[in-house]
Amino acid sequence: MAFELNSVVPWGRSMAEYREMFLLDETDLQKKIAGFGDGPASFNAEAAAAGFSVTSFDPIYQFSEEQLEKRIEEVRDTVMQQMAENKDNYVWDRIRTLDELEAVRMAAMRHFLADYAQGKAERRYIYHELPNRMPYPDGAFDIGLSSHFLLLYTALGYDFHIAAITEMLRVCKEVRIFPLCDLDSKDSALTADVIAHYQKEYAVTVKKTGYEFQKGADRLLVIRRKNEME
């Protein structure tokens, strides 16, 4: 089935949020990073401007800047209405109001759009849909990140998640997945099974982060090749 833009709800986060969600320190940022399902986040744009190496992968990168901008505007009011209806599911400390949330998210997405053409030319934004095999050799990246995609969308099923994470682990020495809850802010039903699957051959840890916007979304899953352990 062809991937359709009208099935996507673009929503972007900033580099500061990525650093907190994924516990990315200065040493991490010096490494080759792959972001899976980054969508219209400004992480790549901000990282590139700072001289870091980030490559983002997402099915939406098959579309033009104009198409993505149009889709962002199409869903903007709907997303904010849903946020208002589910306000109690979020922690309003750093981002204090719905208006502030909209401003923060739109700023990140506009930053992404401004960088999109150059980023595509530099092959920083790559059209790819997991769990399809990637055109990269084993261990091409040091760290792979999945933000608000894997484990969050439990309806994709166990087999999809195992196939997707396995391909990420093929091209990345370490994978970090955030958050470990589902769309209803409950613990993801997949987390325990995913951990059980990978801990036989990989070093698997769950870490608490300092980032929590969606209630309960403050834990990070790290899966690392055992020969990469420090």
Image (spheres, rainbow, N blue to C red):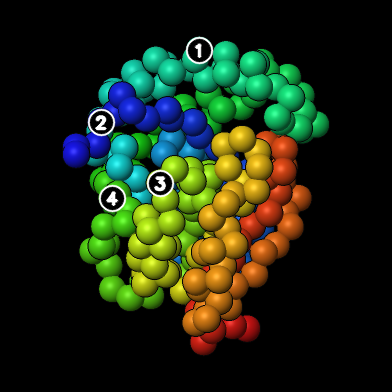
Residue flagged by tag 1: what amino acid is it? Answer: Asp
Looking at the rendered image, the disc whose residue lies closer to the viewer, 3 or 4, is: 3
Residue flagged by tag 2: what amino acid is it? Answer: Glu
Tell me which corner region of the image, top left, top right, bottom left or bottom right, holds residue 184: top right
Numbered badge on residue 128: 4
One can see residue 121 in this view: yes
Tell me which corner region of the image, top left, top right, bottom left or bottom right, holds residue 38: top left
Q: Residue 130 in the image: state x and y as whole percent.
A: 33, 53
Looking at the rendered image, the disc whose residue lies closer to the viewer, 1 or 3, is: 3
- The reply to whether callout 4 and callout 1 are in contact (CB within 8 Å) is no
Residue flagged by tag 3: what amino acid is it? Answer: Leu
Q: What distance separates the C-alpha of mark 3 from that of mark 4?
A: 17 Å
Label 4 or label 2, whichever comes before in sequence order: 2
Label 3 or label 2, whichever comes before in sequence order: 2
Q: What distance separates the C-alpha of mark 4 from that of mark 2?
A: 14 Å
Residue linked to disc 2: 4
Q: Residue 76 in the image: state x and y as whole percent.
A: 48, 17
Residue linked to disc 1: 77
Closer to us: 109 or 86 = 86
Label 1 or label 3, whichever comes before in sequence order: 1
Numbered badge on residue 156: 3
**Secondary structure beneath label 3:** helix
The crowd level at tag 2 (other Cα within 10 Å; few <14, some 14-19, many 20+) is few
